[in-house]
Image (spheres, rainbow, N blue to C red):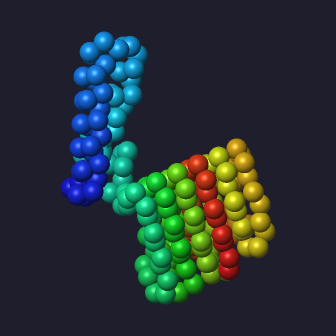
Amino acid sequence: MVARGQKWVAIFLIVLGVFSIFSLLAGRNAFSLFWPVLIIFAGILLIVRPPSILPENIRMHFATEVDERGDWQVESQNYLAFANEVKLDMRSAVIPPGETTFAITGFATELSLILPPQVGLAVKTNALVTDASLFGDKQDYVFTGLEYVSADYEQAGSRLRFELNGFAVELNVIN
C-alpha cells in the first residue's frame, strides 16, 4: 500500500509529465519528450513500487528527522528524502547479531552516530562533498566520497553498514 504523501507526489509527477507531453506535441523538439516520460515513469514507480526498486522498509519524506536514543530495536532501514537528519545513539540499543544495513539518500544528509565499542562499523558515502568526523578524526572529501571499515568489522558479532548518498553529506561518529 502506498503512503498518502507518496501517492500525492506520484499523482503530481504523472500530471506534470502528461502536461509536458501535450505541450511538446504542440510543436516542440521530439528529444524533449525524454524528461516528461521520465517524470511519468517516476510517478508510476511510486504508485506501483516494485520491491526490487523501492524496498518495503523505506521511509520516504521531503525531510526526514530521526532521533533514536535509549532502548530501541535496531533494524535495517532505508531513508529517502530531500534532506535527512539522522541521529542514532546505539549505546543502549538492541543490535541484532550479524549485519544491519542503513541506506540514507537525499540531497543533503546529516548522520550523527554514537556506537558502543564492540560493534563493527562500515561507512560508504557517495557524495559530491563529504564532511566526516570519525572518532575525532575530521576529514573533508570532495568528489571522492568516503569508505571506512573498522578493523574488527568481520569478527564483530554485530555489524552496522551505512551507505550515504547525496550531494552533501555530514557524518559524525563517536564512541
Q: Is residue 143 visible?
A: yes
Q: Nearer the viewer, residue 118 or 144?
A: 144
At a point 69% along the width and 59% down the height, the residue shown is 131
Quick one: 14 or 157, which is closer to the camera?
A: 14
Residue at 29% from the left image edge and 48% from the top image edge: 9
Question: As drawn, is 100 to the left or to the right of 128?
Answer: left
Q: Residue at x 36, y 53 (%)?
A: 55
In the picture, measured across the screen, residue 59 lies left or right of residue 100, that is left
Quadrant for the N terminus in the image:
bottom left
Q: Is residue 55 left or right of residue 68?
A: left
Report if residue 58 is visible in the image: no
Tell me where residue 73 sits by quadrant.
bottom left
Locate residue 33 relative to residue 87 in the image: left or right. left
The residue closer to the viewer here, 94 or 165, is 165
Horizontal and vertical percent for residue 167?
Answer: 58, 49
Q: Position of residue 17 (x, y in %)?
A: 29, 32
Which corner quadrant holds the C terminus?
A: bottom right
Quadrant hosting residue 174 = bottom right
Residue 130, percent across and down? 67, 55
> Would you place residue 20 above or below residue 111 in this image?
above
Q: Is residue 148 above or below residue 30?
A: below
How many callouts does the rendering have?
0
Up the image or down, 104 lies above or below 152; here it is above
